[in-house]
Image (cartoon, rainbow, N blue to C red):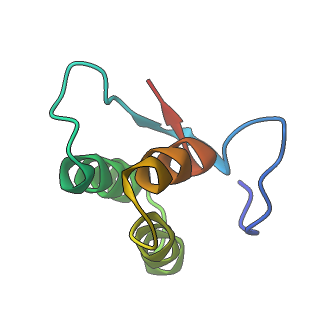
Amino acid sequence: MTTDNATTPAGPKYPNVSVELTGHDGNAYNIIGRCLKAARRAGLGAGPIAAFQIEATSGDYDNVLQTAMRWFDVS
């Protein structure tokens, strides 16, 4: 499992964390909440989870989506 903050062309930082967004409420808070729940279920520690949340909330709606896709396996 990768723990650095570098985004690689190979895929998300945590490909073992699957987040299903298709068919669910698309508001930013729901997206972040689904990502956090999936990260906890996958056993990510408090540090990476907090880092994701800070990054996801540091911009607009597009930033939330882009951050989710950089961090997790989003479908």
Q: Is residue 2 toward the left or the right of residue 22 in the image? A: right
Q: Position of residue 21 (x, y in %)?
A: 31, 30
Q: How many marks?
A: 0
Q: Is residue 27 toward the left or the right of residue 74 in the image? A: left
Residue 58's place in the image compared with 25, above or below, is: below
Residue at 58% x, 51% y is: 71
Q: Position of residue 20 (x, y in %)?
A: 34, 29
Q: Quadrant of the C terminus?
A: top left
Residue at 83% x, 47% y is: 8
Q: Position of residue 25 (x, y in %)?
A: 15, 34
Q: Residue furthest top?
A: 23
Q: Position of residue 27 (x, y in %)?
A: 20, 45
Q: Is residue 33 toward the left or the right of residue 59 in the image? A: left
Q: Residue furthest left?
A: 25
Q: Is residue 9 toward the left or the right of residue 26 in the image? A: right
Foreground residue among 7 and 4: 7
Residue 62's place in the image compared with 45, above or below, is: above
